[in-house]
Amino acid sequence: MYQMIYVSEATEQFQPGDLQKMLDVARSNNLIVGVTGMLVFRNGQFLQVLEGGPTAVISTYDRIAADSRHQDLIVLHRGYSHVGKTFSALSMGFQAQSLTDPLSSQTCPLDFYHFDGLAALDFLVACRPRDALPV
């Protein structure tokens, strides 16, 4: 399975309804092309993993990269996963991070741009909904 993990900065203020509309479109498109993944939105930053066939993942990423709602896209990882699909139950899992925790305090803000590919994947797996865990 091919994976691509990227981080980007939002170019606009997203309201919960805006994010839901974006997710609805993404989930519909992903179901059609067989892409799964996980998206986390926090402090105006997106962190996302896409997985599936290489052509589908790359074309999905290219569509995202052309979307004016994203800027400063950086690919943290691209390549084949040795474990298969990590997010097979999710056409696009989502979590908007707004919880108060030690990592989100003002003294230690979480910046997705500081992640490497492995740290990003670990974080995204930890954010995966419990009902999407493999059995």
Image: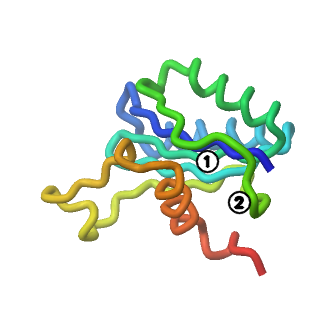
Q: Which mark is residue 70?
A: none
Q: Helix, strand, or loop for circle 1?
A: strand
Depicted 101 relative to depicted 45: above or below: below
Q: Helix, strand, or loop for circle 2?
A: loop
Contact flag, marks 1 and 2 (Cβ < 8 Å): yes
Task: Say whether disc 1 or disc 2 marks the residue closer to the N-terminus.
Answer: 1
Query: Position of 38 compared to 83: left or right?
Result: left
Image position, residue 112 (x, y; %): 39, 47
Query: Position of 64 compared to 76: left or right?
Result: right
Residue that mark 2 sits on: 87
The residue nearer to you, when weighing 45 against 85, is 85
Image position, residue 77 (x, y; %): 58, 43
Image position, residue 90 (x, y; %): 72, 57
Q: Amino acid at mark 2?
A: Phe
Which residue appears at 23% of the width and 54% of the height? Answer: 109
- Examine the image and state in which quarter residue 107 appears: bottom left
The residue nearer to you, when weighing 95 against 65, is 65
Which residue appears at 66% of the width and 23% of the height? Answer: 63
Which residue appears at 39% of the width and 33% of the height? Answer: 9
Depicted 67 relative to depicted 42: above or below: above
Mark 2 neighbour class, 10 Å CA radius: few under 14, some 14 to 19, many 20 or more: many
Q: Which mark is residue 49?
A: 1
